[in-house]
Each structure stands twice: as C-alpha cells, then as structure tokens.
Amino acid sequence: MNTVTYNIPAIHCGHCIHTIETEVGELQGIQSVKADEATKKVEITFDTPASEEKIKALLAEIEYPVGGLITL
Ligand SMILES: [Cu+2]
C-alpha cells in the first residue's frame, strides 16, 4: 500500500474536489482519495495495479495536472 500527496493548483472549488475524488476513485487499485479545497492537496492511497504514473496521467487527462509531489 502506498500513500502519495500531490499539490494540484487547478483545484478551486467543491466541484473540483468531487471530480477528482470520483475520477481517481474509479481507477483500479485506488483505496482512498481525499482532496482538500483550501490547501489544493490530494492524498491518495493505492495498491497495484494503480501506480503514480497512472494516477498522474489520469489527473492530467481530467485537467487537474499535478503541480508537485509533497514528500512525507
Ligand atoms: Cu472547481
């Protein structure tokens, strides 16, 4: 199990939160997605077959590209 936290500058309202949580949550292997409007951060917990590459590709595709990885 892996947990990553990404900064997503394009987050600006509750709709963004909903879109990200729904779309990323549909990827196989995703355990949880928690997006925060105030901090523009998304915390994602996942297992195979999900991967950082797949998550980032999906986020870019839905127009919420990752601005940076926040290392824990
Ligand atoms: Cu929005």
Image (cartoon, rainbow, N blue to C red):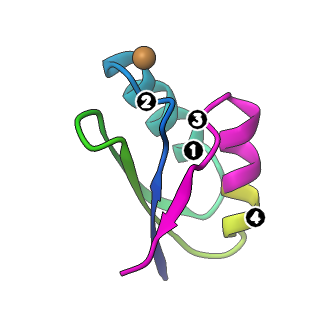
Kindly identify which residue carries mark 4.
53
Task: Judge whether residue 70 is colored magenta.
Answer: yes
Task: Determine whether 22 is above or below 14 in the image.
Answer: below
Q: Which mark is residue 70?
A: none
Q: On the rendering, which quadrant does ligand 1 occupy? A: top left
| Ligand 1 lies under 8 Å from the Cβ of mark 1 | no
Query: How far is the residue under mark 2 from the one under mark 3?
Result: 14 Å
Among the two numbered marks 4 and 2 on one chain, the one whose residue lies closer to the N terminus? 2
Label 2's element?
A: loop
Q: Secondary structure at mark 3?
A: helix
Q: Which amino acid, mark 2?
A: Ile
Question: Where's the C terminus, which quadrant?
Answer: bottom left
Q: Are marks 4 and 2 in contact (CB under 8 Å)?
A: no
How far across and how far down the image is residue 39, in percent?
27, 44
Q: Position of residue 68 (x, y in %)?
A: 55, 59
According to the picture, the residue beneath numbered tag 3 turns out to be 23
Callout 3 amino acid: Glu
Position in image of residue 37 (x %, y %) = 28, 33
**What distance separates the C-alpha of mark 1 from that of mark 3?**
4 Å
Q: Is mark 2 within 8 Å of ligand 1?
A: yes
